[in-house]
């Protein structure tokens, strides 16, 4: 359909986005090494085409009209001049300036999960933050996410002045007149196969889409964590319906959907789990007495949850929807040495009915079997690796994103052993894993690289999908195993954007 150039030379591996002039889903492809690109499924209409590479200014937009049954016209796009490195750098490149070690991993675990550690975080008015400005920023964080708050992400030992001094050594201080220091902007390698990325806007840009799932009708259901609604996206049209949560509270976070299309939603603020009946639209809620982070249905219809901030004892539990019974189980893990929280995170149910949960701060993978009432606790091999949202294959192997360790880990329950693979992008911060059991593909969503990866277990090879939107923290994903499409939620808090939904289709 066209080509992209930089100063008259072919611009290989550049992203090209086609956005309908009348509004609607935005489609993005990646040009090949010669700068050539083509869109596989643009319908009739007018589109605004733009080429993007974070190292250069966007191309001037070109509007093209596509007629039904006609060949699309050829479009040539030219990127603008180079931009400064700090504007081009993803959060992963800025994090790479921090020295490796336990101090960095603790910082990554506590201070990078809400929004990206990007140029907006590290600079003020085009200069690096001073030590005093770092101190003020960390004190604000301690005010809403410190160990003694209602959202205790930061450890009891987090000291604003000490952290500010450490950051200032690597990100300043610099006088306002001094240019920003150099930073390496990596070029992301192309994926093994061509990819189409389609992005959809939610009705409220300030919302935080946390979890999403493809329902029985092929629609995408999304929790609107800050608007306290459920959003239902029709992929065919891009239309989004907002469904209020009539369950005595809001703050929807985690989601599961049963075979009949009924929704199960974890509600953080009221510490409850709610069910929406697909046939009647009626909501039923059950109090679980703790902040439920992740939920998952087992083969018997029980809905399992973990206690995000439960400690002494740490707990998992289930709701029996048919009776309303709630039962919890104390997890046999020791407290952390400094009295901090282990912070349970991901939860999945395996093919054999085992319940698996991770500890973000505790660095453990935990298995529970209801039939034997037994727990197994497994320490991850990389210290302070930050296991977040895992998944299981059809073979029962557990795949784990090591957020602070920047690795993909696999645990074999039969042998009790781990394997780890380092991600091909430094400090990408892998947040969530989802397994396509049909295609034997392991998807990895990152929080700092503006990219999604997939891993081929047979060849032990990664492919990288560069995302067209900057600043995307990927908290949740779902695989449509009928089509192989991956659905992704971008989100950031506070509402710094982007807060969109994307579909990734391997062609």
Image (cartoon, grey):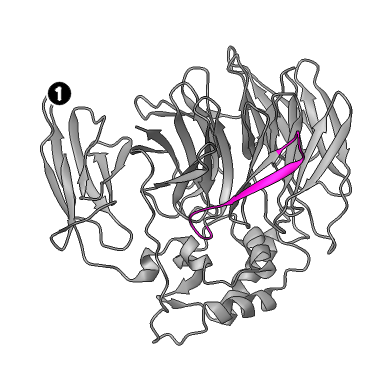
Q: On the rendered structure, is 85 left or right of 264?
A: left
Q: Answer whether residue 225 is visible to the viewer in this image.
A: no
Which residue appears farthest toward the top when viewing the image? 279
Residue closer to the observer: 387 or 167: 387
Q: Tell me, yes or no, whether the highlighted magenta stretch contains residue 123.
A: no
**Residue identified by numbered label 1:** 68
Residue 108 location, quadrant: bottom right
Task: Give the magenta range.
Answer: 412-427
Residue 138 versus residue 217: which sits nearer the camera? 217
Seen in the picture, residue 298 relative to 112 is either above or below; the reply is above
Residue 462 appears left or right of 341: left
86 w.r.t. 491: above or below: below
Residue 367 in percent (x, y) is at: 79, 36
Query: Horizontal placement of 303 versus 23: left or right?
Result: right
Q: Which residue is drawn at the image coordinates 17% and 47% (left, top)? A: 3
Residue 354 lies, with reference to residue 98, above or below; the image says above
Question: Is the residue 175 above or below the residue 55 in the image?
Answer: below
Q: Residue at x 73, y 50 (%)?
A: 380
Identify the residue at image location x=62%, y=26%: 394
């Amino acid at each position: 359909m066209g080509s992209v150039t930089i100063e008259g030379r072919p611009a290989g591996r550049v992203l090209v986005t086609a956005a309908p002039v009348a509004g609607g889903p935005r489609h993005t492809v990646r040009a090949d090494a010669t700068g050539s690109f083509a869109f596989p499924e643009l319908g009739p209409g007018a589109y605004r085409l733009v080429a993007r590479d974070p190292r250069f200014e966007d191309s001037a937009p070109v509007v093209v009209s596509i007629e039904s049954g006609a060949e699309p016209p050829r479009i040539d796009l030219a990127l603008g001049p180079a931009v400064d490195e700090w504007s081009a750098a993803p959060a992963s490149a800025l994090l790479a300036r921090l020295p490796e070690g336990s101090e960095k991993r603790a910082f990554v675990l506590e201070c990078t999960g809400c929004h990206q550690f990007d140029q907006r975080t590290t600079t003020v008015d085009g200069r690096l933050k001073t030590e005093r400005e770092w101190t003020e920023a960390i004190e604000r964080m301690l005010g809403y996410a410190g160990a003694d708050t209602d959202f205790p992400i930061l450890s009891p030992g987090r000291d604003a002045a000490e952290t500010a001094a450490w950051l200032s050594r690597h990100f300043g201080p610099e006088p306002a007149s001094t240019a920003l220091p150099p930073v390496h902007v990596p070029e992301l390698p192309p994926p093994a196969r061509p990819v189409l990325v389609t992005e959809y806007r939610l009705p409220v840009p300030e919302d935080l889409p946390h979890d999403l799932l493809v329902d029985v009708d092929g629609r995408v259901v999304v929790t609107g964590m800050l608007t306290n609604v459920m959003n239902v996206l029709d992929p065919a049209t891009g239309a989004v319906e907002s469904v209020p949560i009539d369950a005595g509270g809001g703050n929807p976070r985690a989601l599961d959907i049963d075979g009949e299309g009924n929704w199960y939603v974890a509600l953080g603020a009221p510490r409850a789990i709610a069910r929406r009946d697909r046939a009647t639209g009626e909501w039923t809620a059950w109090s679980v007495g703790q902040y439920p982070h992740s939920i998952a249905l087992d083969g018997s219809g029980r809905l399992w949850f973990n206690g995000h901030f439960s400690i002494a004892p740490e707990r998992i539990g289930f709701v029996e929807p048919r009776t309303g019974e709630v039962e919890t189980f104390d997890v046999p893990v020791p407290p952390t040495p400094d009295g901090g929280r282990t912070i349970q995170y991901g939860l999945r149910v395996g093919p054999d009915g085992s319940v698996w949960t991770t500890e973000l701060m505790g660095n453990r993978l935990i298995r529970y079997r209801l039939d034997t009432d037994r727990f197994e606790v497994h320490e991850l091999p990389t210290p302070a690796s930050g296991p977040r949202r895992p998944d299981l294959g059809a073979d029962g192997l557990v795949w784990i994103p090591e957020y602070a360790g920047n690795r993909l880990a696999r645990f074999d329950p039969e042998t009790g052993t781990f394997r780890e693979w380092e991600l091909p992008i430094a400090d990408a911060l892998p947040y969530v894993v989802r397994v396509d059991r049909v295609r034997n593909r392991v998807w990895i969503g990152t929080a700092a690289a503006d990219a999604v990866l997939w891993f081929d277990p047979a060849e032990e090879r990664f492919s990288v999908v560069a995302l067209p939107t900057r600043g995307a923290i990927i908290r949740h994903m779902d695989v449509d195993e009928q089509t192989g499409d991956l659905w992704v939620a971008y989100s950031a808090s506070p509402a710094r954007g982007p807060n969109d939904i994307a579909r990734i289709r391997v062609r």
